[in-house]
Image (tube, coloured by chain):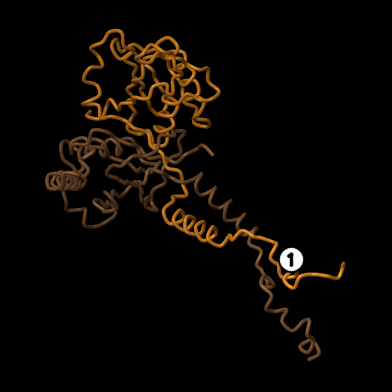
Amino acid sequence: MSRNRSIRKRNRHNIPGNEGELNITSLLDILSFLLISLLANYNYSGQLVNIPGEIKIPNSTSIESQKSGIAVQASTHKIWVEDKLVLDLTSSDSVNKILYDEGGRRIVPLYAELVKIKDEIKAIKMQVDKANDFSGRANLVVDEKMKYDDLRKIMYTCASAGFKEFKFLVLSEIK
Amino acid sequence: MGNYRLPSHRRRLLEENPTINLVPMVDSIFNVIFFLLMTTTFISIFEIRSPIPFVATADLKEDKDKLNLVLEINSAELILKDGVSDSILKRFPRDLSNPMLALDSLHQHLLEIKQTKPDENTIIINPDNVVDYNFIIKTMDAVKEILKTDEPIYIKDPQGVSTKAAFLFDNIIFGNLTE
């Protein structure tokens, strides 16, 4: 009560700049550090690749940044194209289907899906002039335990579907 | 005189402490961080490229000056061959307890070859059916990359200027794809 009665102190709370201020300097420091670390690790390619949980891609010393292409993901028993499952050797549905042709070198479901995607891209390009043309690049996301016998079938299938270049996606070993 | 002060003097004293308003800056940094967190990938994925053999080998064996290097990979060893004469240049036995030993020897031998033929950049690899993908990638690394610890190799660009070679043999072709 006595404080409020004081003539000198009565209007002190109205003095500008007397409000409690939050010190945000340390917050700004943390944000700047976070921003720099995110910018340093940012992938500028804009190409997002989904790696299924069953696939562990190998490490490599390569530093070539990935470019756009059709993603073919392959584990030891399953194959996906752009995240769509096209072959599952563990499924009972695959028992009665013809899975291989051309002397066991070409994987039929994979070939059909790749040709379908290629035709779709070419059809869009015909209709929209500014659309991206078919790159002919296959981004292979392959499990590190896969044997070359199986990898060769995938590569052969990609080549026969009209793909001209393989890109093996790898994890960086360089820290 | 010492007690004489203008009525506005105290207010002016309080206003004489200018501060930078950091709130808009914090706002913008928050926005950028949010965008980066939404779009970034936290694992670094790179690629190793390889052209398909039907296109890539069309003019390989016609040029006699070319090395035509062929690397065969099986579960026991790596065999470096001359692709034209099919003669063996060197064998690199694989030690299963330390698979990098054979790859290191191969890398050193390829460095020596590259020093004599700096413009050569093509190698054909023929892995055996049982070789796993991980070892193929490691072999491709040994064949392709020039490490920081390696002796630098200089190549001449189209203008005749010597530049440091970035890669050893970066045009890696799978030769037995159609077999």
Q: Residue at x 33, y 39 (%)?
A: A67
Outermost residue toward the front in this view = B1
Q: Quadrant of the N terminus of chain A?
A: bottom right
How many marks the image carries: the answer is 1
A97 horizontally vs A90: left or right = left
Q: Residue at x 64, y 60 (%)?
A: B19
Q: Secondary structure at mark 1?
A: helix
Residue B83 at what x, y percent from top left?
30, 15
Sort mark 1 into few (<14), some (14-19) or many (20+) by Cα contacts within 10 Å: few
Colour used to depict chain B in the structure image: orange
Q: Residue at x 54, y 48 (%)?
A: A37
Residue A35 at what x, y percent from top left?
53, 51
Q: What chain does mark 1 sit on?
A: B
For this rendering, which residue is in front, A127 or B19? B19
Q: Which residue is labeled 1 in the image?
A: B13
A35 horizontally vs A163: left or right = right
A34 to B74, vertically: above or below: below
B95 to B23, vertically: above or below: above
For this rendering, which residue is in front, B34 or A161? B34
A144 horizontally vs A90: left or right = right
Instruction: Kindly identify the amino acid type of the residue bearing the numbered disc 1.
Output: Leu
Q: Which chain is brown?
A: A
Residue A50 at what x, y percent from top left?
36, 51
A35 to A5, vertically: above or below: above
For this rendering, which residue is in front, A146 or B21? B21
Residue B33 at what x, y percent from top left?
49, 56
A5 to B18, vertically: above or below: below
Outermost residue toward the bottom in this view = A1
